[in-house]
Image (spheres, rainbow, N blue to C red):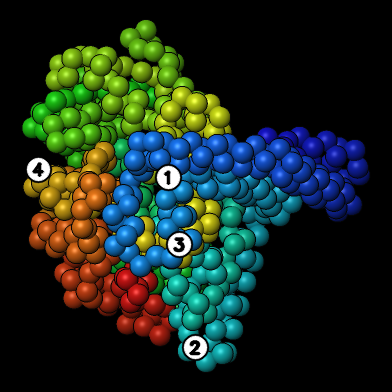
Amino acid sequence: VIAGNARDKLGPCIADLVCAGAMGGMVTNLVLRVYYASSLFALGVFFFAFVLPISSFAGLVYGTSSLLRTWILGKSPGRYIEEGNIRKSQMSALQRFLVLNRSPMVLAFVLPLSRAYQIYTRMRSSFVQACHSAPHLHSKRVEQIKVQFEQWRSEGAKRRIVTARPGWMRVSPKQSSYKKDCFQVRVDRMTDIIEINTQDRWVVVEPMVNMGQLVPALMERGWTLPVVPELEELTVGGMIAGTGVESSSHHSGLFNEFCIELEVVLASGSVVKCSKQERPDLFEAFFWSYGTLGMLVGAKLRIIPSAPYIRLCYYPFESEKSFIEFWQKESQKGVQFASQGDDVNLDMQTGTNGNTCHRFVEGLIFSADRGVVMVGDFADNVGQDGTLYRHGRWYQPYFHKHAEETFTRVKPGSNKPVIEYLPLRDYYYRHSRSVFWEMENIVPLGDTFLFRWLYGWTLPPSVSMLKLTTPKAVQTFYDTKHVLQDMLVPASRIEECLAIFRKHFDMYPLWVCPMYLRPGRGLVHAKGDSSLLYVDLGAYGVPGFVTRGQDYDVVEQIRKVEEFVTSVDGFEMLYADSYMSRAEFGRMFDRGLYDELRAKLGCLEAFPDIYDKIVEPRR
């Protein structure tokens, strides 16, 4: 709020009081700088004088009560890492203490620090937008990157080129270290939304623009992206170099499907634009390549009209078969729109409600025989057939818990759903506050009424801060007891994949998100000549074997799942840890066009290979 006022209110007011021209701009910037500095000072005083002492006291009380219950009951309630797993690991007394008392530490320090860090980054972003935002200077910023490429060549071009963004700032559980020996190019000023064109339905942005910046800017104008990834910290560049999937992907595909044009700096230092019409090979191969074919400096994305609400219908099921049948029926309706490419228009559908494609389809599986399918559509107002649910308020239950409650509100398996209307932003970030369901592992009692009222304002935690505040030895221990994976498999093989997940992970909930893949020559595409419906099965948390104190080898079990996914022409999301060999990686991903362009464009000496970025030797 402070940062927004500084940019939107204070700046124009000061500008009106001073003479026009350069002097006016200088005075405005000066006042904004003073306002920004004083706001940061006020934030620091408030945090250290009030927030940190109170949160530290709460963490101490939580830890003390946990220890008392341990002495009385014999174990700590909600503790998912059993003592047996601790004893089997090579951990010092301090590391053991930090693992077993992670929740009090998180309450006392990490969550407040995370919220303070998020407020700081938003204030800094607003300040940069107010004082330094200059979309018309985009070409000069691109020239600065070209200068850095020239510096790389002048130094002998011996190191591989990567961005200078620190590894801990990546929205990923990986603690990457490959950048330390690379030539790092600064792209942190590439944060502008260059142009929004609602008439022709596109937006041009720089790669460091994140979802928390772009989506609100579009929503203010009544527009949005066809696919909005869940976390606000995710950047456009990250979604293009990697990928993004959401509950609208069954008709709009992955994030790359609504990219119209990319602007890329090649290994030679030249700047090119690519699209389906211009340099189509580079355009197709660039997605999922993780910046190993060039450095992204701009992107043109398709946008669509939005609405203030989502009409969301919850359908609970008490059998896996009925869940899958309903999910597949609703998801399959979206594949027909693959032929429309980047400009899917669901408003042009004809037919009855029974065969029209819903804009959003998503499933959550809570056990072997319990799951909820949710379908949703844009709504201009709250209808009489449902109730308004403001999920974004800090005291509301986690969304997956709210969805599971529908088993008590309607008869499972019936055609009568629970209907609610969610504000658009609340729906887009419905899983963010609980980081899907990972908060239950970070703070086992985190979904209690008391916690939500006292600490709900600190959520969602910053993934970057969680990584930064976790000691390396402790993180190594968690990596052996924790799974964070998304596997993309043909929807026709979903039953087999669920069985594999039960066998090797034995954990719930599971995220079940539909998408289509089209045939092509990129790293990820459908086999054959037609678009196919795929499912993203997301497993996030602690395997049941670990919670029961059994021996469990994360690497071995993930490798078995990777082997199955490859056998059914599926793919592994590369933001998480992968344990494939180079040959196995080549069998899962189609490297034909990718390797051809790597050689043709001089990338072999300039950029790391994708395998070396994703599957680091230490893992």
> Which numbered disc, 3 or 1, marks the residue closer to the eye?
3
> Which numbered disc, 2 or 4, marks the residue closer to the eye?
4
Q: Residue beneath label 4, please?
A: 495
Number of the label disc, if any, that sits on residue 442 = 1
> Which numbered disc, 2 or 1, marks the residue closer to the eye?
1
- Marks 4,1: beta carbons within 8 A: no
Label 3 or label 1, whichever comes before in sequence order? 3
Number of the label disc, if any, that sits on residue 93 = 3
Q: Residue beneath label 2, please?
A: 157
- Marks 2,4: beta carbons within 8 A: no
Res 434 quadrant in image: top left
Amino acid at the residue labelled 1: Ile
Q: Position of residue 372 (x, y in %)?
A: 23, 28
Question: Residue sitting at 20 percent across and 58 percent down?
Answer: 551
Q: Secondary structure at mark 1?
A: helix
Label 3 or label 4, whichever comes before in sequence order? 3
Question: In the current view of this chain or complex, which residue is farthest to the bottom?
Answer: 156
Q: Position of residue 137 (x, y in %)?
A: 65, 60
Q: Label 2 crowding class (10 Å Cα cut-off): few <14, some 14-19, many 20+?
A: some
Q: Secondary structure at mark 4?
A: helix
Amino acid at the residue labelled 4: Glu
Q: Label 1 crowding class (10 Å Cα cut-off): few <14, some 14-19, many 20+?
A: many
Calculate the distance from the C-alpha at mark 3 to the C-alpha at mark 1.
Answer: 20 Å
Label 2 or label 4, whichever comes before in sequence order? 2
> Which numbered disc, 4 or 1, marks the residue closer to the eye?
1
- Marks 3,4: beta carbons within 8 A: no
Calculate the distance from the C-alpha at mark 2 to the C-alpha at mark 3.
Answer: 46 Å
